[in-house]
Image: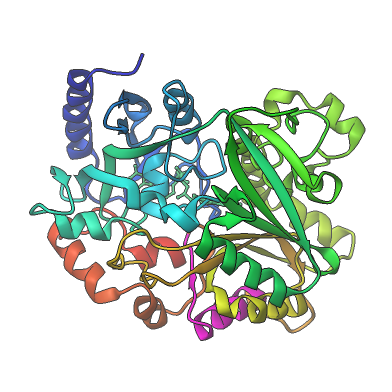
Amino acid sequence: MGPSVEDHAGAVRALKAQYQALPRTEPVRLAKRTSNLFRFGRADAGPGLDVSAFDSVIYVDETERTAQVQGMVTYERLVDETLRFGLMPLVVPQLKTITIGGAVAGLGIESSSFRNGLPHESVLELEILTGDGRVVTARPDNEHAELFRSFPNSYGTLGYALRLTIELEPVQPYVRLRHRRFDNAAACFAALDELCSTGRDGDARVDFLDGTVFHGRQMYLTIGTFTDTAPWTSDYTGQEIYYRSPSRRPIDYLTVRDYLWRWDTDWFWCSRAFGAQHPLVRRLWPRRYRRSDVYHRIVGFDRRHGLSARLDKVRGRPPQEAVVQDVEVPVRQGPEFLDFFLDEVGITPVWLCPLRLRDPVPWPLYPLKPDDLYVNFGFWSSVARRPGQAADFHNRLIEARVDALGGHKSLYSTVHYPREEFWELYNGPAYAAVKGEYDPDGRLPDLYDKCVR
Ligand SMILES: Cc1cc2nc3c(=O)[nH]c(=O)nc-3n(C[C@H](O)[C@H](O)[C@H](O)COP(=O)(O)OP(=O)(O)OC[C@H]3O[C@@H](n4cnc5c(N)ncnc54)[C@H](O)[C@@H]3O)c2cc1C
């Protein structure tokens, strides 16, 4: 049972008082148990705002197909609640502990994004604790419309989402997967474009679409179609590993819940860095710890203490540059970006996910073009730096190429743009206007300072 509307209102009053009591001289941060950010600062930097009373679903309206949810509810909890009604959020990011507030303030994407856009595009109303300590309800058509539109990609620098009304869509119990293999990028991106525009794969409807590029330019597009029955279902939370399945099982079936979390068990493929994919280690690694948040905590500890970096030095290995990014490139530039990426950076696998804005009007702080189909490229690893290369050599290379191709880069990880370039890309004037309105004293950090510095 989630909190009642009255319980939530009480929690909002208490949070407002807590915010007012925080020292004004220090930056504020959310005191949350989990995070999916990839900028690892000091864990205890700045006073924390305790938002633990905002982690639940208030109610699901089955008839209207909407839900009232608190800002820090994780998608894992949200999906468990909505599936009980045969419904799901329009876009469910792959990592279980991503919260709805984090996905809306920081962008999210998944394999339904080619038809449903990004998570913030199915938000109908946002209750926000603003930087200046007010609690406002922002909608696309009220006096806080500008805040509503500028909230996506503001990363908690305008305020914090406390309650959201979101749209839901019906599900069927199973998802049938078809993995189609391609050996050249032009054919792969052409097929992706076609699948998105027609919404059909032969006789089958395309409900979900994503893809993976493996070493040696083996590419797979994975088409997901809801079904009421399944001849069998696979389980990738045990000994088998989902990302290896496209080459082994061209047709596959998962329950809808397992489909939504197919990438979480191994954090895509990133669990291999901890040995969790080795058969022996995997058997010993408790099932409940095969989760992205566990791996995220391990990486956070390592980065904060510089353990791997020190070990590399002792072993005489070249220093590594972490390249953990998600970028969006227009589909027609997909083959060019992929060629560049595989030649100059060389990380594999690479995740592909098509997206098209649902809204006909662009969102100010992340100005993707409505109607254009983009492809998200996700790559999460590190690259050896050659002598003379700057510490952010590959990250800068990627930023430059993404800009040249008319793409955009998500801000959840390291960002290397100089200030002016950053504000050109992320609409500095629009941000300044709304920041001035809702956080004139700068109690919350500025977006550039938060993401880059
Ligand atoms: C390896 C990796 C892969 C990823 N892949 C994907 C992906 O495939 N699909 C996808 O959708 N996303 C992906 N993400 C990004 C993820 O969705 C974003 O980082 C998201 O912001 C994380 O949300 P969180 O709830 O964990 O927030 P946190 O990590 O806790 O916070 C992220 C930022 O959002 C702010 N914030 C958090 N909650 C709120 C709130 N209620 N109101 C306002 N601001 C808030 C915080 O201040 C912070 O700046 C990936 C991240 C990583 C590290």
Left or right: 403, with 180 as reference point: left
Closer to the camera in the image, 64 or 390:
64
Where residue 322 sits in the image (x, y, percent)? Answer: 67, 63
Image x and y of residue 156, in percent: 33, 51
Quarter of the rendering occupied by the N terminus: top left
Q: Which residue is at 90% across, 34% downward?
A: 279
Residue 65 appearing in the image: yes
Task: Left or right? Give the position of 180 relative to 323.
Answer: right
Relative to 49, residue 393 above or below: below
Question: Of all residues shown, which one is farthest toward the front?
Answer: 203
Residue 330 included in the magenta stretch of the image: no
Q: Quadrant of residue 314?
A: bottom right
Q: Residue at x 61, y 48 (%)?
A: 204
Q: Which residues are magenta?
A: 394-411
Residue pushed farthest top? 1
Residue 259: percent from the left, percent from the top? 62, 37
Left or right, 196 with respect to 178, comes to left
